[in-house]
Amino acid sequence: MKRLSFVVSLTNNDNDYQQEQAAAAEKAARQLGVDVKIVHADNDALAQSQQLLHYVQDSGVVRPDAILFEPAGGTAFPQVARAAAAAGIGWVVLNHEVDYILDLRRSFKVPAFAISSDHVEVGKIQGQQFAALLPNGGSILYIEGPANSSAAKERTAGMLKTKPANVQVKTMRANWTEDSSYRTVSSWLRLRTSQESHVDLVGAQDDSMAMGARKAFGDIAESERARWMKIPITGCDGMPKTGQTWVRNGTLAATIFIRPNADLAIEMLVDAIRNGSALPEHKLTKPESMPALADLKASPGAIVKKQHSAGI
């Protein structure tokens, strides 16, 4: 039997979730006896499209059996998808809203599907976390992902559905990395309006950006630092070595576990190619609050106190 080979294109290598995606894909490939090549787009959608076309059109490259990718921008490259499928290459979209999969499957005999966490549900959980941590209401500094990211849009929409009316939200954007969030929050902190703002909680759409905000607070003038460092911070992704650890040691007040799905996508691909198993057009995985929402609601003060004791 031919040994299968896949290309996995991820948005960057600076984000803990993307790093876990790569590790999960490599582990699944080893277990299933397939080859996988991990490439990164450095948060550049144009570079990613050219990267993918390289594996589709370059005659000097052995074509993979399938391409799995998480879009670095606002598009899931429908034209590249058709070119790949026409060349007999399977196509899997990770963590992005996409509307062309059905047409792709009708037109070409290759495995094609999309798999994602339920990002609206991620946002809903985060809104519920805000309600639990601020039972009397308050003001939140909310750090969103890029404006062209469907995941960021869906998380915001979900959050707005569940956050209480007495919780006010001020938003700013970063690019799914600690450094981008650090630069965004640092720039805001230099504005006069930030010194006049009252912030009760920081909520970030991923743990890396949450830590970027924490780092920015730690770098401001000593006279103001204590005030900002007392603010509880929450994130999303909840990877075992980062977000979950930061919640346990009090660095973060809460996170949301979003399981890596590159491994599941590879398992589904292999099963479809080797055994002819049917593939869904779209598959959603379920996120999970950490700590559990019941625990946050039962003792929000204890969670915040734990974060303060961690030096935040």
Image: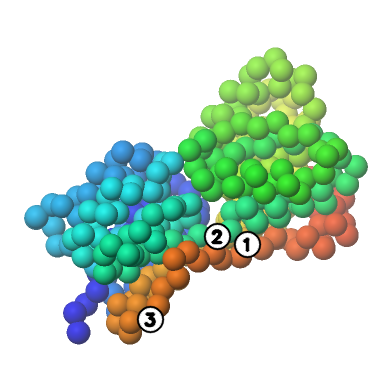
Tell me if residue 281 can be seen. Answer: yes
How is colour applied across the structure in the image?
A: rainbow
| Mark before the other along the chain sequence, 3 or 1 | 3
Q: Which residue is mark 2?
A: 117
Residue at coordinates 70% horizontally, 15% vertically from top-left?
Answer: 192
Q: Nearer the viewer, residue 187 or 126?
A: 126
Please report the residue visible at 70 percent of the width from the left and 52 percent of the height from the top.
124
Label 3 belongs to which residue?
277
Residue lying furthest top: 192
Quadrant location, the C terminus: top right
x and y percentages locating residue 196 in the rendered image: 77, 19
Q: Name the N-terminal-most of marks 1 and 2.
A: 2
Mark 3 closeness class: few <14, some 14–19, many ≥20 residues within 10 Å:
few
Measured Cα–Cα span from mark 2 to mark 3:
22 Å
What type is the residue that disc 1 sits on?
A: Pro
Could you say which is closer to the camera, residue 141 or residue 233? 141
Element carrying mark 1: loop
Q: How far, Cα to Cα, is label 1 from label 2?
A: 7 Å
Is residue 114 shown left or right of residue 105? Answer: right
Q: Position of residue 113 (x, y in %)?
A: 40, 64
Q: CA distance from mark 3 to mark 1?
A: 26 Å
Task: Give me the residue at 70% from left, 46% from top.
Answer: 159
Is 200 situated left or right of 242 in this image? right
Q: Which residue is the site of mark 1?
A: 287
Which amino acid does the dot numbered 3 rest on? Ser
Quadrant placement of the N terminus: bottom left
Q: Residue at x 63, y 23 (%)?
A: 188
Q: Are there few (<14), some (14-19), or many (20+) residues within 10 Å of tag 2?
A: many
Do labels 1 and 2 touch, CB within 8 Å? yes
Badge 3 marks a residue whose secondary structure is loop
Secondary structure at numbered mark 2: strand
Q: Tag 1: Cα neighbours inside 10 Å, few (<14), some, or many (≥20)? A: many
